[in-house]
Amino acid sequence: MNKNTNGKRRPHSIENKPRTRRSIYLPTVREEAGRLELLVLVVLLVLGFLYFQGLLRPAQEVSVTTVSLVYPSQPITLLNASGYVVAQRKAAVASKGTGRLETLAVEEGSRVQKGQILARLENADLQAQAAQAQANLNAAQANLIQIRAGVTNDRLRFERYRKLIQAQAVSQSDYDAAEAKIQQSLAAEAAARSQIKAAEAALQAVRVGLEYTLIRAPFDGVILTKNADIGEVVAPFGSSVNAKAAVVTMADMESLIVEADVSEINLEKVKAGQPCEITLDAFPEERFPGQVHMVVPTADRSKATVQTKVKFLKKDDRVLPEMSAKVAFLSRPIARDEKPKLGVNPSAVVSKNGRAIVFQLKGDQVQEVPIDKGSPLADLVQVIRGLQAGDKVVLNPPKGLKNGSRIKIAEK
């Protein structure tokens, strides 16, 4: 503080404040260049790492193939054909009588036995007729019993008169009357027997009519389709416009075979009893042993084919009618100990450091996989170890393809 002339202190002015100097550090040109070089080096290292990892290398265009199972039947297959599974015993079960469907005891998939009741039509009127016919039969039988009693009585009387006439104890007219009476009684008995037969026939006719209202299974099998429902009118052959003909459709699953068409030019390769292998589209990984049941002795001129029927040697509940099937006709039966083997195209196998390897696809990159090879499988190489069925590998690996290389699949 300064004192003025009046002896008072006055504050310092801004001009009188002491100034402090701040020092600012400016890097040198050499330091800036060092930092830039370090940054460039880090970037180059990162780019080099990415390049060697394959992330910056351009994708190589390659063709691929799939590792597959080679079944024992493939080397001994003479001919392949396609067809469908067909039931040799199949029936559209209908009623011989006409009426309204009252009961339906089965549904799709139900297994039934021969003679089992599948459905029933309304039959109250026929049951009444059957009761009446039974009553008539009972009356005829009772009448026969009554007549038999009269026959017995007349026979005893005739025997007495025959003895008395010999002793001349009765007149000839009385004897003749007793003889006529027994003949009349015997005729009445015969008529009563005929009435019983007529009553039995009438009852049987009604029972047959009742049986027509019961729809039974003609053989053991499985219900395939249900064509009518309770309350609908069922008539033989669907004679009425709104009537149903068949109530259900059923098939004998024990009679399933494959019907396959064979070209005429290959017919000499097929014969009855020939071993076959059946493949179903529903179960592509399974093989069913089969045998040629017969060659149908006629040709289809429009397709120039002959139909063959191949039976299953082993039954399988999964096999259903109308399934698509493929049949391989074999030159010899397959041994029981023969198992499917893994095979790969030989063009996918390369040698590296004395070891067989393949390039397996892993996303958009490939991975080197060493494998153990076995004996040749037709035009494939057997793979004992290293791969699994369904794996995709590079076909004819190009030069420069390495572990981790990026690839893209060539369009066919």
Image (spheres, rainbow, N blue to C red):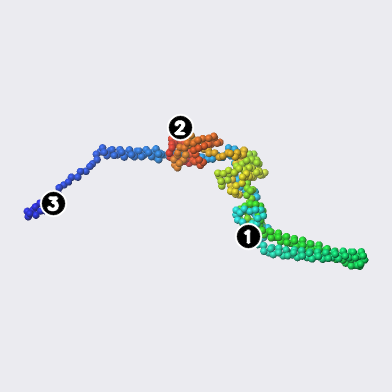
Which element type, helix, strand or loop, lies under badge 2? loop
Residue 180, numbered circle? none
Choose the circle earlier in sequence order: 2 or 3: 3
Q: At label 3, which amino acid type do we have?
A: Ser
Residue 353, numbered circle? 2
Q: In this rendering, would 412 be left or right of 203? A: left
Q: Residues within 10 Å of mark 1 (few under 14, many from 20)?
A: some
- Residue behind mark 3: 13
* Picture residue at 60% right of the left edge, 53% below the top: 109
Pick the front one: 106 or 31: 106
Pick the front one: 307 or 257: 257
Instruction: Check the image and name the residue furthest to the top.
Output: 354
- Residue behind mark 1: 103
Separation of residues labelled 3 and 1 (CA atoms) = 121 Å
Marks 3 and 1: CB-CB under 8 Å? no
Separation of residues labelled 2 and 1 (CA atoms) = 78 Å
Q: At label 2, which amino acid type do we have?
A: Asn
Pick the front one: 158 or 315: 158
Choose the circle earlier in sequence order: 2 or 1: 1
Q: Residues within 10 Å of mark 3 (few under 14, many from 20)?
A: few
Q: Position of residue 107 (x, y in %)?
A: 60, 56
Marks 2 and 3: CB-CB under 8 Å? no
Separation of residues labelled 2 and 3 (CA atoms) = 90 Å
